[in-house]
Image: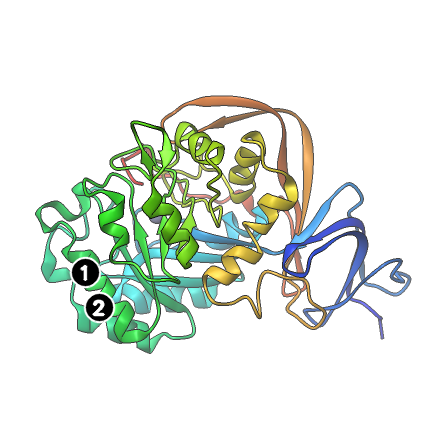
């Protein structure tokens, strides 16, 4: 019997959760990590991947995606978008509410090789149609039903999602947020809050959050910002919230990432806890193409590779309360592994405000192992495209 099923040979292993940055091989067996060491034997392995000149990391975790393909207009298929990009775990950010969560669970989460979790939208219909705000009619925002959906799907439901924005909530203001907080408290879970395009000050929204909750779209350039716009510095309430244990997630997307805001925040010493795509049908073709694309933007903004890896492995695992099982390369753990290559050459980037930059390098995923099975770029073909952009955050 083979000692290892797959050996990733000769890469630079970066595992921020364990403080590892070293030239090591990784061997997998029966879908688990069997060894992380120098010079592993390869003679009887069934597959040897030459990952010289690669960074070998825990399978990337994308904390903000929309993968309810076929059930919402913004859904993309996880196995065709996440796995080729090095993402082994995708968190869906409220595509489904209680009324359509069963379909999401059955037809997408249950049918995908990508590991998927979800936040249940406070609105029963989820984000079914990007053109119509899901919280405009409060009758959709039933607390009891959302609680039942979280409770009935504890293995995959991480908590509750709410989008707070003028065109999504209209005259209902922060009432959907208040209701989502009730769901969080009743289920003892987490709340993920979208803040792009809000008319309410961020500090007012933060007052409803607790440690463990997640602010997504933290570097949005639309509506109220995390910055004091006079001074260009990060609001003291935002810093205090992060220090208290509230996660600040990038959630790039199509309407929610501004290079200018990110640059100002980084210059003021404020770092996002997690980098994520807000991958969806309207963003994934140009503004936020993949998680390595978002990581590459942060390289351009001055962060280094170990740093962007930490914010896409260890940190999101902690943010969803799965630091024990995900986001690391511990022997015995599931063999979710990504091999990233730093590619030289012009790389064109665009933020959600259509500000464009070119860098001379970028990160790309060469190999993705999900529970020991090997994926590469091949799955990228069969994508659906619905046409014109909308204003989604
Ligand atoms: Zn989103």
Q: Are marks 2 and 1 in contact (CB under 8 Å)?
A: yes
- Disc 1 is placed on an element classified as helix
Task: Please say if 46 is above or below 203.
Answer: below
Say what secondary structure mark 2 lies in.
Answer: helix
Ligand 1 closer than 8 Å to label 2 CB: no
Residue 94 rendering spot, x and y as whole percentages: 32, 57
Residue 182's disc is 2
Task: Assess disc 2: are there few (<14), some (14-19) or many (≥20) residues with their C-alpha within 10 Å of its C-alpha.
Answer: some
Quadrant in which the C terminus appears: top left
Q: Residue placed at 63% from the left, 65% from the top?
A: 371
The answer to which of 59 and 131 lies nearer the viewer is 59
- Percent position of residue 367, x then y: 67, 49
Q: Is residue 65 visible?
A: no
Residue 15: % across, % down: 67, 56
- Pointer 1: what residue? 178
Is residue 189 placed above or below 250 in the rendered structure?
below
Q: Position of residue 168 (x, y in %)?
A: 19, 46
Residue 120 in view (yes/no): yes
Q: Residue at x 10, y 54 (%)?
A: 137
Q: How many marks?
A: 2
């Amino acid at each position: 019997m083979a000692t290892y099923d797959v050996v990733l040979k000769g890469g630079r292993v970066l595992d921020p959760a364990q403080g590892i940055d070293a030239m090591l091989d990784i061997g997998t067996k029966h879908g688990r990590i069997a060894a992380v060491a120098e010079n592993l034997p390869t003679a009887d392995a069934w597959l040897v991947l030459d990952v010289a000149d690669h960074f070998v990391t825990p399978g990337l975790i994308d904390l903000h995606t929309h993968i309810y393909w076929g059930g919402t207009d913004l859904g993309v298929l996880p196995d065709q978008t996440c796995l080729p990009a090095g993402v082994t775990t995708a968190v869906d950010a409220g595509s489904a509410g209680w009324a359509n969560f069963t379909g999401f669970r059955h037809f997408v989460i249950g049918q995908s090789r990508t590991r998927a979790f979800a936040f249940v939208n406070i609105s029963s219909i989820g984000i079914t149609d990007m053109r119509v705000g899901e919280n405009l009619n409060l009758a959709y925002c039933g607390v009891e039903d959302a609680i039942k959906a979280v409770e009935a799907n504890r293995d995959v439901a991480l908590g509750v999602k709410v989008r707070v924005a003028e065109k999504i909530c209209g005259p209902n203001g922060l009432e959907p947020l208040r209701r989502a907080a009730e769901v969080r408290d009743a289920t003892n879970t987490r709340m993920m809050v979208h803040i792009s395009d809000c008319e309410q000050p961020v500090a007012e929204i933060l007052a409803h959050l607790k440690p463990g909750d997640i602010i997504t779209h933290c570097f949005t350039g639309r509506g109220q910002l995390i910055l004091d716009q006079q001074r260009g510095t990060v609001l003291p309430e935002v810093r205090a919230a992060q220090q208290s244990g509230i996660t600040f997630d990038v959630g790039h997307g199509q309407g929610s990432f501004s290079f200018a805001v990110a640059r100002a925040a980084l210059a003021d010493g404020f770092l996002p806890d997690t980098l994520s795509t807000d991958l969806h049908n309207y963003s994934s073709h140009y503004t936020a193409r993949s998680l390595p694309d978002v990581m590459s933007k942060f390289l351009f903004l001055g962060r280094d590779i170990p740093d962007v890896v930490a914010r896409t492995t260890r940190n999101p695992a902690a943010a969803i309360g799965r630091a024990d099982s995900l986001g690391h390369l511990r022997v015995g753990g599931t063999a979710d592994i990504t091999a990233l290559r730093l590619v030289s050459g012009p790389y064109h980037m665009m933020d959600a405000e259509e500000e464009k930059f070119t860098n001379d390098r970028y990160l790309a995923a060469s190999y993705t192992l999900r529970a020991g099975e090997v994926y590469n770029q091949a799955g990228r073909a069969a994508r659906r495209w619905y046409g014109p952009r909308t204003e989604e955050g």
